DNA sequence: CCAAATTGGATACCTCTACTATCTATGTTA
DNA sequence: TAACATAGATAGTAGAGGTATCCAATTTGG
């Protein structure tokens, strides 16, 4: 198909598709002539993926590019691919230096017995949150996070279960990315709704 | 204190503080003369809150203003205040019209027996996620979300437990907001780490 | 088979966000 | 009293995420 059909089928304007091509989010089509190129279903799928990551999840165009690059260069080692892909998405701003809360995060991970990379950005995000709460006069230490971490463990089991039975390593990596990243807003939405429900339950005290 | 001290103690530049004043995120100081105003500890605290919401959680300045407005106008009804405050934060882009997935979300909420407002934006966020996954060839229906929702219920219990024992309604509303909103990146970080750990566990198959 | 429409690629431009800089009239301080 | 700080107003800036226009080449409908 040519660019106008790609545009029609994806709902993304031709100029925006050209922009994604320029930015390296979408691979170039197969050139058939000096001013003609041919796109296929893979391009359509990639375009939908880009819109899901930027729209639903709210990732920036540059973060999305980094993520897709990792997927494209995947080595067949899904564990590694997923780790690299998630490392590309920042969850909070990087703390200036080494926050004193980093030691607390280490204590939490040790208590949990988790096997987590030393330089995982998720560690910095946790430290940043603890530091912020502290500066706002709501001190919470790593022990507060422990029960949340136990629930996160069970969430991760659900996540990994959904990848069971996928044989093709490329498909596996893509599903892993999708279910991890796109489910994030959904999980926050579920928490919001559960809070509303729990708050209502306690409000109408019984 | 005057603006320069507020700047020094908060780490936010004087010009940025003036910007927040203009944008209505920070209330004006008490005027002592035509070109002089006095700020207090409340201003400092508010400034730290603004930086936490925009920096750690990544909220936009306008969303942050909406949130703080709700807090300021709180009626003493914490359940209502929290609901309004969370409603001000979009979790994903609004779907154009009524997505067909909205019915699925209704089914989920019904199955859970949750008491959740009909127009909660979290509902739209869930529908949007389901629609995206579907368009990407990873169909998931509401039943997939059920076990996640059960874990969200338990997360919400932890959240509400942390507010137990706070008497002052203003403090209660502020803590509720902080723990709900600022904990969001932390919870996502915990899930990432738990996934990495679970993936490693399964990778080194035993 | 030729005029009108489409295409790929390049470049310029635009809107929004979150600041940042400058200016002026007034205050404060050493 | 001279140097410096301050409030408030206005203008400017950098980056993100597109959008618009132009051109030469290429299809395609009549």
Image (cartoon, coloured by chain):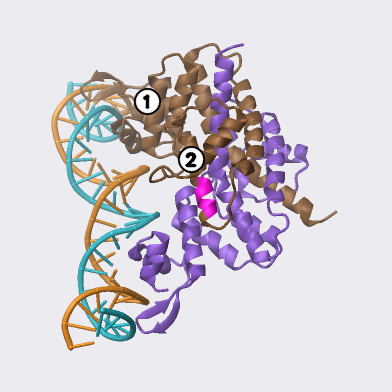
Chain colours: A brown, B purple, C cyan, D orange
If you read the primary sequence from the N terminus, does the residue marked by circle 2 or circle 1 appear first? 1
Disc 1 target residue: A69
Q: Observer-nearest residue: D27 or A118?
A: A118
Do tag 2 and tag 1 residues touch (Cβ < 8 Å)? no
User: Residue B109 bears which disc, if any?
Assistant: none
Magenta-colored span: A129-134
For this rendering, which residue is in front, A67 or A25? A67
Q: Chain of mark 1?
A: A
Residue bearing mark 2: A102
Q: Is A166 placed above or below A178 here?
A: above
Q: Residues within 10 Å of mark 2 (few under 14, many from 20)?
A: some
Where residue C17 sits, quadrant-wise, is bottom left
Element marked by disc 2: helix
Principal secondary structure, stretch drawn in magenta: helix
| Left or right of B67 in this view: B163 | right
Quadrant (top left/top right/bottom left/bottom right) for the C terminus of chain B = top right
Which picture quadrant has residue B39?
bottom left
Note whether B62 is above or below B136 in the view shown: below
- Taking the image as shown, residue A86 lies to the left or right of residue A184, namely left
Q: Residues within 10 Å of mark 1 (few under 14, many from 20)?
A: some
Please name whichever residue, B4 or A64, is drawn nearer the observer in this view of the structure: B4
For numbered disc 1, what is the local secondary structure?
Answer: helix
Residue in view at x 70 percent, y 30 percent: B143
Say if the magenta span includes residue B48: no
Q: Residue at x 62, y 35 (%)?
A: A149
The residue most toward the right is A206
Task: Measuring from the top left, give residue B68's x and y in whole percent.
Answer: 54, 62
**Residue B100: image x %, image y %?**
62, 37
Q: Position of residue B61 (x, y in %)?
A: 44, 57
* Residue B124 appears in view: yes
Q: Chain of mark 2?
A: A
């Amino acid at each position: 198909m040519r660019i106008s059909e790609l545009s029609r089928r994806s709902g993304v304007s031709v100029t925006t598709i050209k922009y994604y091509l320029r930015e390296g989010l979408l691979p170039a089509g197969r050139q058939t002539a000096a001013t003609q190129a041919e796109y296929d279903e893979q391009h359509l799928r990639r375009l939908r993926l880009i819109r899901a990551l930027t729209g639903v999840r709210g990732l920036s165009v540059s973060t999305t590019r980094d993520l897709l690059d990792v997927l494209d260069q995947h080595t067949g080692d899904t564990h590694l691919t997923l780790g690299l892909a998630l490392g590309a998405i920042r969850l909070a701003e990087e703390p200036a230096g080494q926050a004193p809360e980093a030691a607390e995060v280490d204590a939490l991970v040790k208590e949990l017995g988790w096997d987590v990379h030393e330089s995982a950005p998720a560690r910095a995000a946790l430290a940043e949150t603890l530091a912020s709460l502290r500066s706002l006069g709501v001190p919470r230490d790593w022990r507060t996070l422990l029960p949340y971490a136990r629930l996160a463990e069970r969430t991760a089991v659900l996540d990994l279960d959904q990848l069971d039975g996928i044989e093709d390593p490329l498909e596996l990596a893509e599903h892993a990315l999708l279910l991890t990243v796109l489910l994030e807003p959904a999980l926050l939405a579920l928490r919001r709704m559960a809070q509303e429900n729990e708050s209502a339950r306690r409000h109408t005290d019984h």
